[in-house]
């Protein structure tokens, strides 16, 4: 079935999201591994993505772990360095779909404040036809509830939605609900899927 809407994840699909890479560069791999072993930083980030205060959640965590206080605060203070660079070909695919009249949605685990901040650096984040931001929805992928909310809001049948995400657990839940899915491993493979689905020509997907 030809998709009626295309849904993009953002982190590692449109923008690289690699906190470990940032910390490896700033404090070194050995110290980074020790910090990630001592502090559940991704769990902290999940709380932001569920709607928690961006600075407040991170700074509270920093105070809880005084040995890592300054490094944890970097998650907020140097956040845009972790969320970079943009993945240029993915952005071209997004814009080619919109130019062809294909509705394009974002479904992303993102805090409300951090998304607004990211959009000041990456204005293309405002270009989607619909935004499904977990911080506003108070639920994160792969909870089935976030997919249910997307379906209810957009009014399209699940089998008409084509979704790409870089995480297998997020893809698995979408597929279980009947969505068409693609596990993102780079923009070249995603471009091939969009062409095969009849949404873009090879030239449009270049």
Image (spheres, helix red, strand yellow):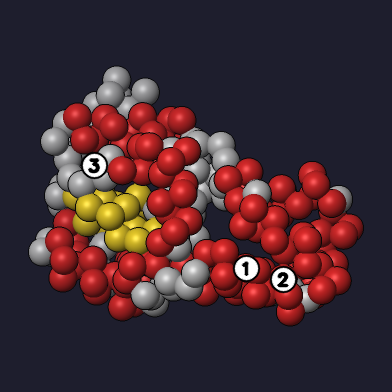
**In this rendering, is residue 57 above or below 71?**
below
Secondary element at image label 2: helix
Question: Residue beneath label 3, please?
Answer: 197
Mark 2 neighbour class, 10 Å CA radius: few under 14, some 14 to 19, many 20 or more? many
- Disc 1 versus disc 3: nearer the observer: 1
> What residue sits 28% from the left and 55% below the top?
131
Q: Mark 3 and mark 2 in contact (Cβ < 8 Å)? A: no
Residue 170 x, y percent position in the rendering:
43, 66
Q: Mark 2 and mark 1 in contact (Cβ < 8 Å)? A: yes
Q: Give the CA separation, mark 1 to mark 3.
A: 41 Å
Q: Is residue 151 left or right of residue 181?
A: left
Tell me if I can see residue 42 in this picture.
Answer: no
Q: Give the CA separation, mark 2 to mark 3.
A: 46 Å
Hey, which quadrant is residue 192 in on the image? top left
Specify the label residue 62 is tagged with: 2
Numbered label tally:
3
Residue 103 x, y percent position in the rendering:
18, 45
Question: Residue beneath label 1, please?
Answer: 58
Q: Give the CA separation, mark 1 to mark 2.
A: 6 Å
Sequence order check, earlier mark of 1 and 3: 1
Q: Is residue 94 left or right of residue 39?
A: left
Q: Is residue 55 left or right of residue 13?
A: right
Towards the viewer: 8 or 85: 85
Towards the viewer: 131 or 163: 131
Secondary element at image label 1: helix
Tell me if I can see residue 66 in this picture.
Answer: yes
């Amino acid at each position: 079935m030809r998709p009626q809407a295309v849904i993009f994840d953002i982190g590692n699909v449109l923008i690289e999201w690699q906190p470990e890479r940032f910390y490896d560069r700033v404090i070194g791999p050995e110290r980074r591994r020790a910090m990630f072993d001592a502090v559940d930083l991704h769990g902290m980030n999940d709380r932001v993505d569920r709607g928690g205060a961006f600075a407040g959640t991170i700074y509270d965590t920093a105070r809880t772990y005084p040995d890592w206080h300054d490094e944890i605060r970097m998650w907020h203070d140097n956040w845009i360095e972790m969320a970079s660079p943009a993945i240029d070909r993915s952005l071209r695919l997004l814009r080619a779909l919109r130019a062809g009249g294909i509705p394009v949605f974002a479904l992303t685990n993102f805090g409300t404040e951090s998304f607004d901040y990211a959009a000041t650096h990456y204005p293309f984040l405002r270009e989607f036809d619909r935004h499904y931001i977990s911080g506003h929805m108070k639920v994160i992928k792969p909870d089935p509830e976030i997919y249910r909310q997307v379906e209810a809001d957009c009014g399209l049948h699940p089998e008409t939605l084509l979704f790409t995400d870089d995480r297998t657990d997020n893809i698995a839940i979408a597929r279980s609900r009947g969505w068409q899915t693609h596990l993102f491993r780079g923009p070249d493979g995603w471009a091939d899927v969009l062409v095969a689905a009849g949404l873009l020509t090879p030239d449009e997907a270049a």
